[in-house]
């Protein structure tokens, strides 16, 4: 472990306490906290009514119920998020949890009547404190004064402002060349623009591009127009409630929580008065949506989210690490921007393809796991016990909101959105699959070049029983006839369905001497996709050499907008001058195989998405339009098939799950997203035949997981095996069918090729009697699987093999996720500047911390070297003519996973600033490998080691990597654990929104690491 916690026997602790008690009392003054606050927390929070321990430390790893210990001032101070009066609740979360239900007054941007909602916020300890009690008042006053040990008001933080930004934003209807026609713009220009420029537009405040209210310097007419466009909706009919005013005003004077602190101490401040006059003239926001779904959400769903406590700072606030980052409004007032953002975020959390509201993550995450049909939620099952059959849906839609079951209100909204957004869309109508008598003899995920004729593409009519949710199949028919393909001579691979449910894409191959090609079938016919299957050219139209190899195009996947992503062996088509090779390349993992990357077919031609040298296969999409897939990672002493993700503009090539065998498996394949946004995938070991293994469900919001019991899988700290406390650790991996273990020689059943059904269940190929994954001789049938209960229903018996199933139905189109700076899990953008098209720019916010995550990603803490001396290397493919290990010469090494070809070239070393930050430019798209001085298991000191996977940065990508260690616990710690490994040090830190990128290197010119003329080197690479 990387922290220094020491355990002592209990009697030893008591003895030390006894020996030291008198001296401590005599020499250490007792603080205000010790005298007045600690006794209240001790009696109310440290013990339950049954005198069992509650909010106290339970072990030497920082675990405590609710991740809160009240044993000392230092412990309480670790949870500053509980000491802020945030959102609509009026009291800090530390008190909100322990008081009885309280009325909350909610208002909105219009002149509608205020809504009174009674809170119903879960707390296992119950209501422990009356809001009229002296204990409540004492703690409230202490928090209001800054929650210090001495009860003295702390000095306001003096955060140095960074320069403002001149770059204009972009938005629908914004025209930088013309003054807005609204009459209030003149007042804004004369009275408000200068006020904003003097107090709000610093680069680490609203001048941060990641800020939801992004403002420019305001120095030019164009910048003034943008600033008006940006703030125009932050006003309300009730002027003093306008968010632009309340967020900037001191809470003592009636303002609300503001990450940037109080700008105005009173409402008489000249700046406040100027904004107030303009807001009164404007009278409310512009362009208020009137569609029924939004209105229902704003008037009914948003209030019940408040009721259940979802908008607490440490739950679903903008500072949190997961995707559902709700805006808490301003002291009970929800302006239009907050409501719109909450609506959009909530819409992404529901499944519109199923009439069952429980298929949506927004509901399923709040039902009791397993027997209640729910999935694990750090906040607990807030809707447990509610069932759709008990709902009065008319009352849920029209009755007094405060009297309704929140579950029923949300269910009614989901149905309204289904009627509005999915009207006329295709319901589940069929299942398409590949039927074949025998599977190819070489049939691991990487063996796509293997040819085996005798495959049929079958369509079966399908329906879901509305009572029990199980799918049934009926009439079947072959789809090959209109395609001009013959069952006897064709091989088929992985059909996929377009988001509107009208098209089916698949890969077909007619001979071992012919390449895979993409076909598309619909009601009008079937044909090869000419744009994809044509002879490849680069993005400038120049021909790509075939190098005597077949150009395979396979594994199609429809993007939400209808474009097709696919795997291909064509080689690089972007930044071609930046590579010393062109056309198809052999894979370093196994030079007898061609390498496959991912591409997208769009109106401008074929654009490359991935550039790495080993296989990238099996693409599919998340509901938000991000691409997920399996990548092969192979290096000396390392092998892993892992889940990855990337944005369709090429930004944020990012780990998804299963990057290390600490998950208990060396292969994660066939990853798909389910209706509740959990992931389903096949987990297996190297050598598993036919892509078979265990079916696993991954709840990404719970973070990384570790299940391996092999110390060798923990390359830095083998003692991490025993680190998680099972009473507190929430595993993100679950196995619906534990009997199908995914182990080569100890399984009872085997799965492959999962695919989502609209109601949250899974279609998957299943070999029931299989006990040996190294051979897999049992035919695969087709089953439907409930990922929560593990119940399984047979749909088509095996013999022939039924593989690659996919359901035909329309899915809600939430658009395409684009790279953006306000995504904390992938801060990146793609520049279109000509000067950036051959390179990418990386700002490492904390390079030493990044290197501490390179080899082991467990919650045991970070071993951070003071200067890891990072080196950036280019990874190279096998040289021309190398088609197997034998011809690879000295570039081939042996390890426990077999042989691997390794050829690299040093590009350069980043310059490290004193705060650990660095800024570099690297060749765009070129496969990179880092090396650094880190301490692995067995090392007595940091030693040079190479990262065990390749990285890429897209041409034109400008990204930030890592996170300052001082803020790591506040964002990244939720998934990765704290810097020290102590769980109670993980706490939301709102300062990340403005300060995380304020590092030394950000203001420096980047170090250019672009020279690719260095000597090529072979192993050993430690």
Image (cartoon, rainbow, N blue to C red):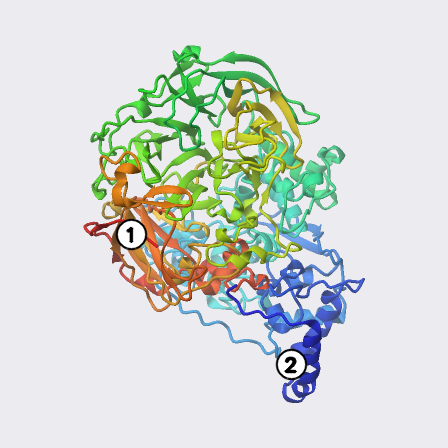
- Residue 512 spot, x, y in % from top left: 34, 20
State the residue at coordinates (52%, 64%).
Answer: 980
Residue 78 left/right relative to 478: right
Q: Quadrant of residue 373?
A: top right
Residue 571 to residue 639: above or below = above
Please name the residue that numbered disc 2 is placed on. 31
Q: Residues within 10 Å of mark 2 (few under 14, many from 20)?
A: some
State the residue at coordinates (33%, 62%).
Answer: 869
- Residue 140 spot, x, y in % from top left: 67, 69
Residue 283 left/right relative to 105: left
Q: State which quarter of the image contains the C terminus.
A: bottom left
Please name the residue that numbered disc 1 is placed on. 873
Q: Could you tell me if residue 574 is visible in this image?
A: no
Q: Residue furthest right?
A: 50
Q: What whole-number distance in Å separates the C-alpha atoms at marks 2 and 1? A: 55 Å
Residue 896 to residue 560: above or below = below
Residue 317 left/right relative to 132: left
State the residue at coordinates (66%, 88%).
Answer: 23
Residue 946 to residue 649: above or below = below
Q: Nearer the viewer, residue 950 or 646?
A: 950
- Residue 705 spot, x, y in % from top left: 55, 49
Q: Could you tell me if residue 905 is visible in this image?
A: yes
**What secondary structure is found at the residue carrying circle 2?**
loop
Residue 760 to residue 48: above or below = above
User: Which-is-in-front pick, marks 2 and 1?
Assistant: 1
Residue 733 left/right relative to 489: right
**What secondary structure is found at the residue carrying circle 1?**
strand
Q: Residues within 10 Å of mark 1 (few under 14, many from 20)?
A: many
Q: Nearer the viewer, residue 107 or 642?
A: 642
């Amino acid at each position: 472990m990387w922290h220094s916690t020491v355990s002592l026997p209990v009697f030893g602790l008591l003895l030390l306490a006894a020996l030291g008690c008198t001296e401590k009392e005599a020499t250490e003054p007792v603080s205000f906290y010790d005298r007045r606050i600690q006794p209240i927390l001790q009696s109310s929070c440290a013990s339950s009514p049954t005198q069992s321990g509650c909010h106290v430390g339970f072990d030497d790893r920082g675990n405590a119920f609710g991740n809160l210990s009240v044993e000392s001032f230092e412990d309480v101070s670790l949870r500053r998020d509980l000491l802020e009066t945030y959102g609509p609740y009026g009291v800090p979360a530390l008190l909100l949890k322990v008081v009885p239900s309280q009325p909350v007054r909610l208002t909105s941007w219009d002149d509608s009547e205020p809504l009174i909602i009674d809170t119903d916020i879960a707390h296992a300890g119950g209501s422990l404190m009356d809001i009229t009690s002296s204990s409540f008042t004492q703690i409230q006053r202490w928090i209001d004064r800054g929650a210090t040990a001495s009860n003295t008001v702390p000095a306001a933080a003096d955060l140095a402002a960074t320069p403002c930004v001149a770059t204009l934003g972009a938005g629908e209807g914004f025209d930088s060349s013309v003054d807005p026609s609204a009459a209030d713009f003149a007042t804004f220009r004369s009275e408000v623009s200068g006020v904003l420029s003097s107090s709000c537009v610093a680069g680490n405040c609203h001048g941060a591009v990641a800020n939801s209210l992004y403002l420019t310097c305001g120095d030019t007419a164009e910048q003034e127009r943008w600033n008006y466009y940006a703030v125009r909706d932050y006003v309300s009919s009730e002027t003093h409630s306008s968010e632009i005013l309340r967020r900037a005003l001191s809470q003592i004077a009636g303002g609300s929580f503001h990450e940037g602190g109080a700008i105005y101490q009173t409402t008489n401040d000249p700046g406040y008065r100027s904004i107030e006059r303009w807001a009164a003239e404007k009278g409310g926001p512009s362009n208020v949506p009137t569609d029924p779904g939004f209105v229902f959400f704003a008037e009914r769903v948003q209030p019940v989210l408040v009721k259940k406590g979802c908008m607490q700072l440490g739950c679903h606030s903008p500072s949190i690490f997961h995707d559902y980052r709700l805006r808490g409004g301003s002291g009970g007032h929800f302006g239009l921007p907050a409501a719109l953002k909450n609506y959009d975020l909530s819409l992404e959390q529901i499944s519109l393809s199923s009439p069952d509201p429980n298929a949506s993550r927004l509901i399923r995450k709040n039902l009791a796991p397993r027997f209640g049909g729910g999935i694990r939620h750090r906040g607990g099952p807030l809707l447990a016990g509610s069932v759709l059959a008990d709902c009065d849906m008319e009352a849920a839609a029209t009755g007094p909101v405060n009297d309704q079951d929140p579950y029923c209100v949300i269910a009614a909204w989901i149905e309204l959105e289904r009627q509005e957004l999915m009207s006329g869309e295709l319901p589940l109508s069929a299942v398409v699959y590949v039927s074949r008598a025998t599977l190819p003899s070489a049939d691991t995920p990487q063996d796509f070049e293997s040819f085996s004729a005798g495959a049929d593409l079958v369509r079966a009519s399908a329906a879901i029983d509305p009572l029990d949710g199980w799918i049934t199949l009926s009439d079947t028919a072959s789809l090959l006839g209109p395609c001009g393909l013959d069952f006897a001579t064709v091989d088929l691979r992985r059909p996929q369905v377009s988001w509107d449910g009208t098209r089916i894409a698949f890969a077909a191959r007619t001979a071992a001497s012919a390449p895979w090609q993409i076909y598309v079938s619909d009601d009008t016919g079937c044909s090869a996709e000419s744009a994809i299957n044509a002879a490849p050219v680069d993005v400038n139209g120049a021909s790509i050499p075939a190098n005597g190899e077949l150009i395979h195009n396979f594994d199609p996947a429809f993007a939400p907008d209808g474009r097709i992503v696919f795997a291909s062996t064509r080689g690089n088509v972007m930044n071609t001058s930046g590579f010393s090779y062109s056309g198809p390349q052999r894979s370093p993992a196994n030079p007898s195989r061609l390498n496959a990357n991912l591409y997208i077919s769009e109106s401008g031609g074929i654009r490359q998405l991935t550039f790495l040298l080993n296989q990238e296969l099996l693409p599919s999409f998340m509901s938000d339009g991000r691409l997920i897939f399996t990548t092969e990672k192979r290096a000396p002493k390392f092998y892993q098939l892992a889940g990855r993700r990337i944005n369709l503009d090429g930004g944020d090539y990012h780990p998804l799950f299963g990057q290390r065998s600490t998950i208990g498996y060396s292969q994660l394949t066939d990853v798909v997203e389910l209706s509740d946004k959990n992931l389903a995938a096949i987990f297996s070991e190297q050598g598993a035949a036919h892509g078979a293994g265990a079916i696993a469900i991954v709840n990404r919001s719970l973070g990384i997981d570790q299940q391996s019991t092999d110390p060798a899988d923990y390359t830095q700290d083998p003692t991490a095996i025993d680190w998680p406390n099972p009473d507190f650790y929430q595993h993100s991996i679950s196995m619906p069918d534990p009997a199908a273990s995914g182990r080569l020689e100890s399984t009872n059943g085997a799965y492959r090729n999962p695919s989502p059904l609209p109601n949250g269940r899974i279609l998957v190929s299943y070999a029931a009697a299989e006990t040996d994954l190294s051979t897999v001789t049992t035919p695969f049938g087709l089953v439907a699987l409930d990922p929560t209960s593990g119940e399984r229903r047979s749909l088509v018996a095996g013999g022939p093999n039924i593989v690659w199933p996919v359901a035909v139905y329309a899915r809600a189109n939430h658009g395409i996720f684009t790279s953006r700076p306000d995504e904390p899990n992938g801060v990146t953008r793609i520049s279109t500047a000509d000067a950036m098209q051959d390179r990418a720019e990386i700002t490492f916010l904390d390079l030493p911390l990044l290197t501490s995550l390179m080899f082991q990603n467990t919650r045991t803490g970070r071993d951070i070297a003071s200067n890891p001396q990072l080196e950036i290397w280019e990874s190279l493919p096998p040289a021309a003519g190398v088609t197997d290990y034998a011809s690879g010469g000295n570039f081939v090494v042996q390890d426990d996973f077999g042989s691997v070809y390794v050829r690299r070239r040093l590009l350069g070393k980043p310059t490290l600033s004193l705060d650990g930050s660095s800024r570099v430019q690297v060749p765009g798209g070129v496969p990179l490998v880092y090396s650094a001085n880190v301490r692995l298991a067995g090392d007595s000191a940091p030693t040079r080691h190479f990262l065990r996977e390749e990285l890429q940065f897209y041409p034109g990508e400008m990204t930030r990597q890592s996170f300052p260690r001082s803020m790591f616990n506040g964002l990244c710690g939720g998934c990765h654990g704290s810097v020290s490994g102590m769980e109670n040090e993980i706490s939301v830190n709102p300062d990340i929104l403005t300060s995380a990128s304020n590092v030394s290197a950000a203001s420096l010119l980047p170090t250019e690491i672009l020279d690719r003329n260095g000597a090529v080197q072979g192993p050993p690479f430690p």
